[in-house]
Image: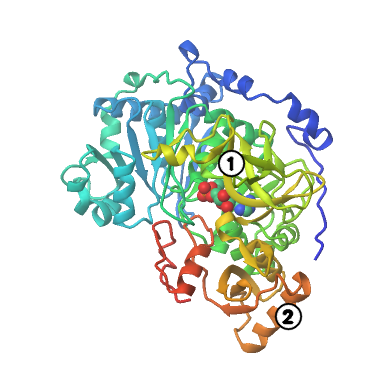
Amino acid sequence: MDWPIIEKSGDFAVPPYLTDWEAARAAFDWQTEIDRLSKLPGGGLNLAVEAVDRHVAEGRGETVAMRWISRNQDSRRELTYAQLKEQTDRFAAALRHLGLKRGDTVAVMLNNLAELPIAALGTIKAGCVFCPLFAAFGPEPVRARLILGRARLLVTTEALYLRKIADLREDLTELDHVLLIGGSGQPPQGCLDFQATLNAASPEDGTVEATSPDDPAMLHFTSGTTGEPKGALHPQRSAAGIHATARMVLDLRPGDIFWCTADTGWVTGSIYKLLAPLLAGATGILYEGEFDPGAWYGVLRNEKVTVWYTTPTAVRMLMRFGAALPRTYRPLSLRLAFSVGEPLNPEAVIWARDALGLPFHDTWWQTETGCIALANFAVTTIKPGSMGRPVPGFEVALVERRPEGGLRFIEDAGIPGEIALKAGWPSMFSDYIGAHTRYEECFIDGWYLTGDLAKRDADGYFWFLGRADDVIKASGHLIGPFEVESALMDHPAVAEAGVIGKPDPVAHERVKAYVSLSHGFAAGEALRRELIAFARLRLGSALAPKELVFIDELPKTRSGKIMRRVLKARELGLPTGDLSGMDSDIRGTGV
Ligand code: 6R9
């Protein structure tokens, strides 16, 4: 189906993008951005100073930096920029008192609590490395990451500590300190109370560490849809990439109420939930509750959220509950809505325009890129189903790896290739911790290879095909699972779809689809046939699924990514590999 393109108009902070995209790109220079943020003595740059202290110095201390909202939305806690400065100074001072040094790792395993930004930014202020972990992780993945990340200090809640870490403590020889939030007030042996530690610290001692732009600031373990977890390090200069994309892509500015729904353990949690609104001088929302349609629409309306960043999974779950529900939560103050993490099917973009009054803008990036690299910008025309165009400062190409070495660049529109980024943008990961060879293997001739396949159209918009590992080869055709999934999701009965290649002696692989249904539809042979016929009509017989089965929930990571490799492993009766990033709520649901 041809989805309409959506023209944008309105009052935006960076108008040239729509009108003169090439000129805007030509005028942009990362070094200028980095230099602008490197104001510490000796040209130092500290992300936390840029995100917090700068606003206080420039007279915005009384602006609310972060607003925390409890699960039932019956209590909230606000931290102004001035308060966040004072609290992060205290936290940095506490880290020093405890003997942490520049470059040491501080792991933080917390859901959305008001203490989260204090721990995250205080860590960075002290020159230590902030390493977020999913609170839903079981003991084994936590142990593996604490050891690999060489964490010296952990911040978590007493409940999570007792459930997941207390029994492992002996194995964690480098973990010197644990700071606990909540609980009995009598911390278990070997732990300190977070608040008491903060109260005892004197903020004057928390003088900022004059980190250099190249010093590490964050360590993010990737969500691992396809294999072993990898720990990507991000330098202090990432501030420039996050700040520029907050401004240019999300159009964030002082006065905005920004809600990013990402889990803390996912890279989007630190980069866009915490850092982007702060770098832009806006107000960030931290909502304690899990996904629930009524609660989420309530947060959007009651908190007067102006800019929203969420995932395709969440959008599709909202769609399952229908367009009538959001209409009962009007008026909304939303002016922009964005999505990331998985391909966003065009139907979801259009649904939002009708149900919420504005379309979703898809954005693409990875843990390794450290900030958004492709986007349907706030001010540009949206092509539903496309990830958009390169962010100024990024050189993005489609390439093929030559068997004899080197790259072949694909210039023609419509030809699939692997997305490659010219190395050197400021928030580019600087290493995989403990796996430097693996890091070096990501680069060829000065280009970072992403492992994602896409096509580009004549207007320079990128269209996602799939992870290179997930691409299906059937009867000589190269099939991106997303093309098939997206076509299936155009059918009203289909809430979500996951597509894999099943080995086939004749065709090499055959397309198999797993489908979860929207409310009000029942699985059955007639519907199964109808969906196959529907897909055939749209995609032709080469791409349409030959097999289709119904499934209650697709296996997903905590960040909402469909784990196609799990579907495939189950199909083949093979081990599913590392499942640590998988959403524990749906782990083990039958396929
Ligand atoms: C931020 C984040 C990265 C992988 C990436 C790609 C997939 C992200 C996407 C998308 C299609 C989009 N991905 N955004 N696929 N359209 N707009 O998600 O980082 O957890 O490292 O995952 O997610 O496959 O390579 P990370």
Residue at image location 44% in from the left, 27% down from the top? 85
Quadrant hosting residue 352: bottom right
Disc number at residue 533?
A: 2
Q: Nearer the viewer, mark 2 or mark 1?
A: 1
Identify the amino acid type marked 2: Ala
User: In the drawing, does residue 303 fall left or right of residue 82?
Assistant: right
Residue at image location 71% in from the left, 46% down from the top? 335
Vertical order, 78 against 531 (above or below): above
* Foreground pick, 255 / 111: 111
What color scheme is it? rainbow
Vertical order, 53 against 507 (above or below): above
Quadrant hosting residue 327: bottom right
User: In the drawing, does residue 4 fall left or right of residue 175?
Assistant: right
Residue at image location 68% in from the left, 42% down from the top? 408
Vertical order, 44 against 588 (above or below): above
Q: Position of residue 282 (x, y in %)?
A: 59, 35
